[in-house]
Structure formats: structure tokens, C-alpha cells
Image (spheres, rainbow, N blue to C red):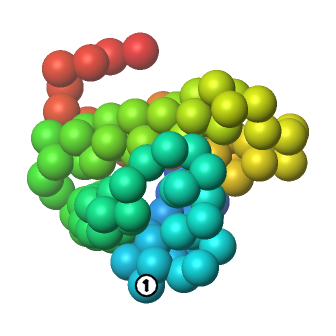
Amino acid sequence: MTKRNKIIYWIATLWLALGMLSTGIVQLLKMKEEVGMMAKLGYPVYMLTILGVWKILGVIAILVPKFALVKEWAYAGFFFAMSGAVFSHFAIGDAAKDFFGPVLLLVLTFVSWYFRPADRKTGLVNL
């Protein structure tokens, strides 16, 4: 892995981890804005707990060494959660500003996954 790729990986991964951790905590705390957004999107409030726990566990998975298969599942979970958020905002006709967070986290998920070092790959998928 080149030094450039390692820098890209760690910048994307740290920003991804920060974004997922902060939104996961906000969801677990069931802040008023999050509850309102979930209601607007048509989802039950208990989804905040599920998403918050999964995001925090996903952050732990992508940051700790080893456990490549668990990392793959964490990246997949981040992709599904954020693509689902983008689609949900699109489906109800939200403004472009509501797409920024989920799209940014979706891009960071892909960049972090794509540039991950060899010891963080399962060897099952090679791009």
C-alpha cells in the first residue's frame, strides 16, 4: 500500500468513524430533532435505537485491527443505512440540504472500504 493510499484510507476512515459515532449517539439519545426526522420519514422511533447501536458497533469494527470479515459486514451495514437514508429523503421529496449528511457518509464509506489495507480485507473481493 502506498503512503498516499494509506493517508486517504485513514482520513476517510476517521471522518467516517466520527460521523457514524456522532449520529449513532444522537440516535441513541433520541434527540428531539432525530425523533422528528424519523416521524417525517415514516419510520418508528425504535429504529433510532437499532441504528444507533449498529453504527457504534460498526465504528468499533472498522477501527480495531484484524476481523476482516466483521469489517466487511460493518461497511455493508454503513452502505445500506446511508443509501436507505438517501432514498428515504428522496422518496418524501426532501430538500437537497437533507441529502448532504447521508451522501457524505456514503462516499466516506466507499472511500474507506476501497482504500483499506490488505490486512483489513477478506480476500474474497478484489477490485
Under tag 1, what secondary structure? helix
In the displayed structure image, the side of residue 85 where residue 99 appears, left or right: right
Label 1 packing within 10 angstroms: few (<14), some (14-19), many (20+): some
Location of the C terminus by quadrant is: top left
The image position of residue 53, as x and y in percent, is 28, 68
Q: Amino acid at mark 1?
A: Leu
Residue depicted at 18% across the width and 20% down the height = 124
In front: 76, or 11?
A: 76
Visible residue check, residue 38: yes
The image position of residue 86, as x and y in percent, is 62, 35
Question: How many numbered marks are there?
Answer: 1
In front: 58, or 90?
A: 90
45 vs 111: above or below: below
Residue depicted at 26% across the width and 18% down the height = 125
Farthest residue to the right: give it: 96
Visible residue check, residue 21: no
In the displayed structure image, the side of residue 1 where residue 55 appears, left or right: left
Residue depicted at 61% across the width and 51% down the height = 40
Residue depicted at 32% across the width and 16% down the height = 126
In front: 32, or 7?
A: 32
The residue that disc 1 covers is: 29
22 vs 45: above or below: below
In front: 65, or 62?
A: 62
In the displayed structure image, the side of residue 43 where residue 107 appears, left or right: right
